[in-house]
Image (spheres, rainbow, N blue to C red):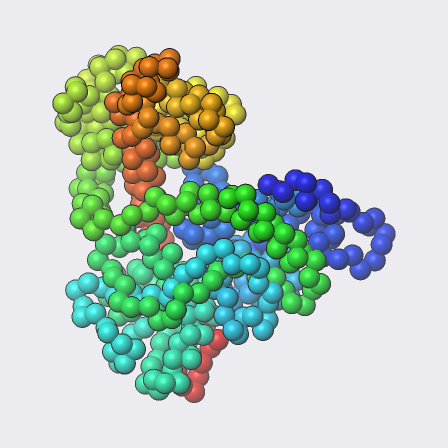
């Protein structure tokens, strides 16, 4: 993205003193970005780095022609201090643009809008106003925009108090509310929407503030050259549609289904526990994230080894008779055989895909092939290419899969009619949701809040901003 613009930024010889920050970055060949681990920022997925903020920062590093170096901070205050002191070049951490922060940092053009949501457990009475928080335990992340907003609200509601948690995360705060350790928490809407599948009993009561923008933060103590180049990057990303595509990729498939979420968590405890080791063992052999294989199994059968469909596919991984024979599965209802057979079949499809298809599209294409068939997927790729779309981009190809049910279209393809073309699009979306739910469910226990000496209670005469 932006190769032509990036080429316009010329390096200055190292001997020249006081180089602008942009030229320092390009001369060093490295962009150092501060962030925090989380579902909307940065995390590990299938042994690779990903996350909305990470991918956006990676695109900016590519724009500049340099490598991206990520530094993660568990404490938001430490992250902001690192930006302020110039220890990193910028922060891409889902930071809300607030009046107080705007006095300390330069913020890029916004790339998303969020609201501050008050979260409570559904078996408790829902608060209607800020006054309903009096006498209750309210928790927020220290140095966050939430604490800044609560400080303003306290001027009109003097009885309002809250606890600020250092070295904490939104996941830890949601755990506290879910476990009854706190009555309420304030988190950003995009974060809560991501975690809802593993906290189906938590609710949003009301927004504490009107929608606010998220943006990158740059130190105001340095020159504005890097900030200016980021503005050029965002202009191009908006005009090309790349930014919107990234939003859809990370947030477009997340739909909350209360009954589905509760069922998923129940099956997590009652069914997955029986097969988890089998998923892990074969995943290790094939170098695949076991949670992805488990997500396929859940989509196929709800982890039921005796599942059978009207078309004759059966077992935990719902293998056809032909696929089972190809993978050496003699008993499709044997959970161990089904998992091994399904995993190897997915791996075979993954490796068979053209080398030009890169991650994460490669995984999504392999999932679609598992459902609709490799030949039909290739037909959809050819249709996309014929219409000037990118045959290596899942979001382009998925538009063509439903068309394989139309005679005027499939009659012109190599593999003919695909009855489940449209279904495969839903199939991939569902597995992405189940996979992420498994990731956050397995991470949940590692993010229980642990008090530290820095934890404080913010009151009228003792506020931490």
Q: Residue at x 53, y 55 (%)?
A: 92
| Towards the viewer: 333 or 336 | 333
In the image, residue 453 above or below residue 389: below
Q: Residue at x 73, y 47 (%)?
A: 9
Residue 159 in view here: yes
Q: Residue 419's x, y, as percent?
A: 25, 22
Tell me: 134 left or right of 77.
left
The residue positioned farthest toward the front in the image shown: 408
Q: Residue 205's x, y, as percent?
A: 26, 67
In the image, residue 357 above or below residue 149: above
| Towards the viewer: 378 or 314 | 378
Which of the 4 image quadrants contains residue 144? bottom left
Q: Residue 360's x, y, as percent?
A: 45, 35
Residue 346 in view here: no
Q: Residue at x 61, y 62 (%)?
A: 218
| Towards the viewer: 182 or 58 | 58
In the image, residue 61 above or below residue 189: above
Q: Residue at x 19, y 42 (%)?
A: 267
């Amino acid at each position: 993205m932006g190769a032509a613009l990036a080429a316009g930024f010329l390096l200055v010889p190292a001997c020249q003193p006081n180089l602008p920050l942009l030229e320092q970055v390009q001369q060093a060949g490295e962009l150092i970005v501060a962030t925090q681990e989380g579902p909307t920022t940065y995390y590990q997925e299938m042994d690779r780095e990903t996350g909305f903020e990470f991918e956006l920062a990676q695109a900016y590093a590519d724009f500049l022609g340099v490598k991206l170096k990520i530094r993660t901070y568990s404490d938001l205050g430490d992250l902001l201090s690192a930006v302020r002191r110039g220890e990193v070049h910028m922060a891409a951490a889902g930071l809300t643009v607030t009046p107080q922060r705007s006095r300390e940092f330069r913020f890029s053009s916004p790339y998303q809008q969020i609201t501050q949501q008050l979260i409570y457990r559904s078996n408790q009475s829902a608060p209607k106003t800020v006054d309903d928080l009096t006498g209750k335990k309210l928790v927020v992340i220290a140095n966050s925009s939430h604490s800044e907003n609560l400080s303003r609200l306290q001027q009109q509601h003097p009885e309002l108090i809250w606890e600020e948690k250092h070295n904490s995360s939104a996941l830890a705060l949601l755990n506290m509310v879910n476990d009854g350790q706190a009555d309420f928490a304030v988190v950003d809407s995009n974060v809560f929407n991501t975690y809802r599948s593993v906290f189906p009993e938590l609710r949003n009561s009301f927004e504490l503030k009107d929608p606010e923008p998220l943006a990158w933060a740059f130190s105001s103590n340095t020159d504005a050259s890097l900030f200016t180049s980021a503005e050029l990057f965002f202009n191009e990303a908006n005009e090309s549609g790349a930014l919107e595509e990234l939003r859809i990729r990370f947030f477009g498939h997340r739909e909350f289904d209360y009954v589905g979420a509760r069922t998923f968590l129940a099956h997590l405890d009652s069914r997955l526990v029986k097969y988890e080791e089998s998923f892990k063992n074969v995943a290790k052999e094939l170098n695949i994230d076991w949670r992805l294989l488990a997500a396929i199994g859940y989509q196929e059968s709800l982890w039921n080894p005796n599942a059978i469909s009207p078309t004759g596919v059966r077992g935990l991984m719902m293998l056809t008779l032909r696929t089972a024979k190809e993978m050496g599965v003699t008993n499709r209802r044997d959970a161990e055989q089904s998992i091994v057979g399904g995993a190897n079949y997915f791996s075979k499809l993954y490796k068979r895909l053209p080398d030009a298809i890169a991650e994460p599209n490669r995984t999504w294409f392999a999932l679609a092939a598992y459902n609709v068939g490799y030949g039909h997927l290739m037909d959809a790729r050819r249709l996309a290419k014929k219409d000037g779309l990118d045959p290596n981009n899942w979001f382009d190809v998925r538009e063509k899969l439903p068309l394989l049910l139309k005679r005027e279209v499939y009659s012109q393809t190599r593999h003919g009619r695909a009855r489940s073309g449209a279904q495969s699009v839903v199939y991939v979306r569902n597995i992405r949701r189940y996979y992420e739910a498994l990731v956050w469910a397995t991470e949940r226990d590692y993010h229980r809040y642990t008090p530290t000496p820095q934890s404080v209670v913010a009151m009228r005469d003792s506020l931490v901003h």
